[in-house]
Image (cartoon, helix red, strand yellow):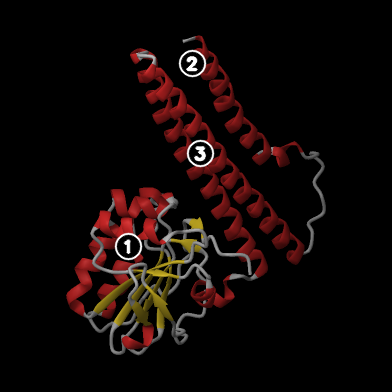
């Protein structure tokens, strides 16, 4: 029993130290001198924003790794407590595991939001959005395999409206739309009989076949998740977040590029009324009307591309 309590004490200390350390690193720039510096050139400001976004991504990766190690240790102690018939201790450890996982999800949401803001600022400063803003461009053709082994080619969908959804099953913004709001599956079903094809694309470099297959099965997806772990198609389209949505009309032209809606994690940006951008675009297209809002700023986790 002493071994168990000693191990728990050490892990509790670690649980408290890690989030605090992450927060101190994120907030480190706030201790800068109060004297207002001269604004650097636009190009340099864009580089600085990009560097900070990369630093936040490292914090996210480190937080996930530390979490996995701690949960493994807690489960080992839990097993030991069960073996030694310390039922009350085992129950407390199980509650601690649940608490830690909730803390991780909240920490990741905050870091992803911060990363998104930094990337948006970097994009605006450096003119990164120019390529993505090319609405009414010809949709680049591609051929990808689904995670269940089926070949999918964009050019096979002539005279069809196609929705491309950039997807990452680890991203809380994506999970919100699948596990809470049901946005993607509901829209795909709503327009399925109106000559609209829905394709999810996963450009996450470290994702696995098994994880994506399990996701399709769990959520009973009627559309495939396409394997773009190389990142080739994502970069071709300029996808920067998950989700990032593209709508292609029957002529093969990109007529919408941006967010699924204006409500990240269900909260309307800046207050006001919720606008379902993709739903609105599809309603207009299927009624023979032009898309009235062709470009918005996407939100979500950054696309986890492989290193070029």
In this view, the residue farthest toward the front is: 83
Q: From the top left corner, tell me how far across and down residue 219 is, in percent.
A: 26, 56
Residue pointed to by mark 1: 276
22 on left or right of 103: right
Secondary structure at numbered mark 1: loop
Query: How packed is label 1: few (under 14 Cα within 10 Å), some, or many (20 or more)?
Result: some
* Quadrant placement of the C terminus: bottom right
| Residue 237 percent location from the top left of the image | 50, 76
Closer to the camera in the image, 299 or 277? 299
Give me the residue at 30% from left, 81% from top: 161
In the foreground, 239 or 38:
239
Q: Nearer the viewer, residue 23 or 307?
A: 307
In the image, residue 218 sits, relative to residue 289, either above or below, namely above
How far apart marks 3 and 1 lie (CA) works out to 36 Å
Image disc number at residue 68: 3
**Left or right position of 171 against 26:** left
Residue denoted by label 2: 4
């Amino acid at each position: 029993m002493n071994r168990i309590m000693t191990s728990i004490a050490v892990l509790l200390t670690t649980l408290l130290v890690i989030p605090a350390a992450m927060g101190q690193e994120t907030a480190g720039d706030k201790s800068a001198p109060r004297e207002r510096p001269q604004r650097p050139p636009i190009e340099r400001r864009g580089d600085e924003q990009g560097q900070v976004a990369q630093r936040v991504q490292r914090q996210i990766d480190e937080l996930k790794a530390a979490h996995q190690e701690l949960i493994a240790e807690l489960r080992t102690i839990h097993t030991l407590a069960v073996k030694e018939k310390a039922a009350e201790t085992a129950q407390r450890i199980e509650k601690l595991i649940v608490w830690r996982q909730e803390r991780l999800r909240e920490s990741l949401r905050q870091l992803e939001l911060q990363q998104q803001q930094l990337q948006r600022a970097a994009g605006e400063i450096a003119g990164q959005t120019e390529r993505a803003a090319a609405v009414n461009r010809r949709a680049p053709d591609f051929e990808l395999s689904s995670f269940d082994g089926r070949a999918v080619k964009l050019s096979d969908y002539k005279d069809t409206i196609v929705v491309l959804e950039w997807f990452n099953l680890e991203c809380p913004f994506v999970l919100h739309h699948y596990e809470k709001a049901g946005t993607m599956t509901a829209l795909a079903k709503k327009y399925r009989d109106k000559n609209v094809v829905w394709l999810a694309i996963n450009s996450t470099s470290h994702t696995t076949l098994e994880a994506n297959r399990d996701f399709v099965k769990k959520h009973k997806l009627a559309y495939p998740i396409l394997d773009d772990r190389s990142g080739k198609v994502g970069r071709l389209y300029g996808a920067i977040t998950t989700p990032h949505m593209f709508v292609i009309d029957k002529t093969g032209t990109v007529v919408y590029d941006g967010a699924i809606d204006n409500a990240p994690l269900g909260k309307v940006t800046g207050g006001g009324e919720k606008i379902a951008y993709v739903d609105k675009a599809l309603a207009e297209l299927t009624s023979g009307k032009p898309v009235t809002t062709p470009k918005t700023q996407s939100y979500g986790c950054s696309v986890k591309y492989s290193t070029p």
